[in-house]
Image (tube, helix red, strand yellow):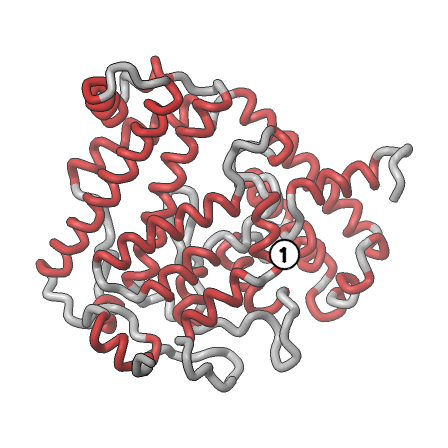
Amino acid sequence: MPEKIPIKQFEDNFLAPYAMKSYNSRGRLHKEKEHPYRSVYQRDRDRIIHSAAFRRLEYKTQVFVNHEGDYYRTRLTHTLEVSQIARTVAVALRLNVDLTEAIALAHDLGHTPFGHSGEEALNEIMSKAGGFNHNLHGLRVVDFLEDRYPEFPGLNLTWEVREGIVKHSSAFDKSAKLKELAPQEIPTLEAQIVDVADEIAYDNHDLDDGLASGLLNERGLEEVAIWADISRQVCDKYPKISAERKRYLIIRSIIDIQVTDLIQEIEKAIAEFGIKSCAQVKKMDKKIVAFGRQMCRLRAPLREFLTENLYNNYRVVRMSSKAKRFIQELFKVYVDSPRQLPPAVQERIAACGVKRVVCDYIAGMTDRHALDEYKKLFDPYEKV
């Protein structure tokens, strides 16, 4: 029988000096006995996977509303793609994979139904009551709203995972500031990697979904250099390839070159700044996880193409506008008559206020749940 290697010894032997070691964690909100065979970040990752909020991501919109079709990405499949990309980078750099995965799997737990349009609607409605930020709401989910353990509210995650949730930032997400999570500090390399992995996943699965939906076409993409160059390479190597396989290979290759560039650029930055510890990373004045200049130049036209032809497509704009109206009307009904809320939800009103409780309730809905509630409340022939 092989000899067991203690977690501390394993991390000291195999992780880079600038990786976040689990035994250096700043701990949990509520003290608890740790597991002899699993690190604190392994436990965090598993708690996130088993949470109700994580399961609900399956029926929350990425770009296309859930009922548009089975093929399109959801928040759950997006989250898994982010986790896979982030894990690849973390392994290559000998970072803490468990911490990286935990942050990746939790980074969208605070998202509303109907994607960013749902978040915008709740933020507008709550503008005079604290607003709505999905990173802060994600922290509220794991700290308070998840109800699974008798000893404490929420999931009682470690400080570092909670920091990664709050400070998550990308082209679509704004990081939040919270005094208890040291807003003056740069997040760990593990958290920084998740931010960029999120952007890589977004761009490439939105390309795939956009092409599958017919809202995008390959003729337009031939004007985008990163797509055109790889398309030529694929056609030269496989002249008789089917259109579907060609599309898959192009998108796979775009992901690969971005991930490769990212790893190489992080390695250069670590050497350039002489980074020797996680503490040194956190004291820097800027994040060091970023693409190289050439890759940034290649990615910019692709982002512009997606914005113009997919996110601003009239069908997507219609879906977003309709989703906002659903949320606005649901919110008004619940606030005007809170007794229509489930009893367990009503119990939180005294402590949190009716608007925040309604906001929590709607934010936790899946697309399907929100649509069902809308029908129950507004369709006179629908059973309540």
Please report the residue visible at 44 percent of the width from the left and 58 percent of the height from the top.
176
Left or right position of 82 against 279: right
Estimate how packed mark 1 is, as few (under 14), some (14 to 19) or many (20 or more) residues with alpha carbons within 10 Å.
few
* Position of residue 189 in the picture relative to residue 169 (left or right): left
Q: Is residue 226 above or below residue 180?
A: above
Q: Which residue is rendered at x = 60% and y = 34% of the image?
A: 65
Q: Is residue 7 above or below residue 111?
A: below
Depicted 155 relative to depicted 261: above or below: below
Image coordinates of residue 193 in percent, x first then y, are 31, 54
The quarter of the picture where residue 308 lies is: top left
Q: Compare residues 312 and 82 and report the one nearer the observer.
A: 82
Q: Secondary structure at mark 1?
A: loop
Taking depth in this image into account, of 272 and 20 the one nearest to the observer is: 20
Q: Residue at label 1?
A: 129
* Residue 225 seen from this side: no
Of the residues shown, which amino acid type is indicated by label 1? Ala
